[in-house]
Amino acid sequence: MNLALLTCLSDGMPKVRSELAKFSQNVAFDVQQLRELGLNIEGNTAYYQLIPQLPLLNPHQISTALPSYRIHYYPIITSTNEWILQNIAHLQKGDLCLAEYQTGGRGRRGRQWLSPFAGQMILSFYWTLDPRKSIDGLSLVVGLAIAEIFGVQVKWPNDILFNGRKLGGILVEIANVKNGRLNLVIGVGINVSMPEKTSINQPYAQLCEIAPNVDRQILFPKLIQHLYTRLERFENSGIDEEFQQAWQKHNAFSHQAVNVLTEQGIISGIEQGIDERGYLQVQCGNELRTFNGGEVSLRRK
């Protein structure tokens, strides 16, 4: 991928070939490679133009709606989580990185996170907690906050679902910073409007199915404020009864027959929500078993 060429095109304005030649020895070849990644680039013998899936974000407007935090906006970025990790020494709790497109987005367990240009909500933010605080269940908190804002469901531990299809994902990473706090980078990716052709090889959902006139500009501040409210409550109260009940309300597999995929094999039972640590509870015959998010996967039976 020619990143310099893509960055030049990322403002969505027409660019004449002579201007693009500064970034590429073979403009037509590099443009075709970008198109093969799913980017919608129109052009002719005179110019090329990258067409965004949705209107580009206005970072100033989002900053105005979130005056307590610094917004760092990049149309093209390797990974918003990676940017936070690299710049964490200069950031304050709650500062954010937003992007239109990631060239190296990551999901859970190192999977690639694929994104169209300006078709998703892509954000990462810096958060800190008391180091004595257990972070068991933290990713569930982020998942529930997203589900509450969009009126969708969560699949333990932190997949965001709409009608059984994946709407978004979460990536939580611990940063090694010596400041007496537990330092976290929390990344979120939500499908908003996807192109007809994508390289995603599983059923996926998008917010435009729920609200055809969805506006990312309005949703970003709303989502971020609710995320931070939920995280502050988690630091004070943990996975308390209120949280467990709220999570169960959005639980995609509540009281359904499920398979839990472990290293030892498949365990079947009836899903019973989460406990005070955020662990999955499954009724297996007469035994109520619990599972930690790092060690297993959950599937509907």
Image (spheres, rainbow, N blue to C red):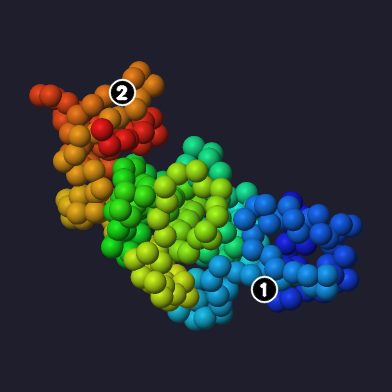
* Image location (x, y in percent) of residue 110: 54, 39
* Image location (x, y in percent) of residue 58: 56, 77
Is residue 156 visible in the rendered image? The answer is: yes
* Image location (x, y in percent) of residue 155: 31, 45
Q: Mark 1 vs mark 2: give the one in front.
A: 1
- Per the image, the residue denoted by label 1 is 12
Q: CA distance from mark 1 to mark 2?
A: 48 Å
Query: Which quarter of the image is occupied by the C terminus?
Result: top left
- Do tag 1 and tag 2 residues touch (Cβ < 8 Å)? no
Residue at screen point 55% across, 52% down: 198
Q: Looking at the picture, does residue 98 appear above or below residue 188?
A: below
241 on left or right of 114: left
Q: Using a 10 Å C-alpha cutoff, classify the residue at mark 1 as few (fewer than 14 neighbours), some (14 to 19) or many (20 or more).
A: some
- Of mark 1 and mark 2, the one earlier in the sequence is 1
Residue at screen point 36% across, 31% down: 296
Secondary element at image label 1: loop
Residue 297 figure quarter: top left
Pick the front one: 31 or 223: 31
* Image location (x, y in percent) of residue 83: 62, 56
Q: Which mark is residue 188?
A: none
32 on left or right of 222: right
- Per the image, the residue denoted by label 2 is 266
Is residue 82 visible in the rendered image? The answer is: no
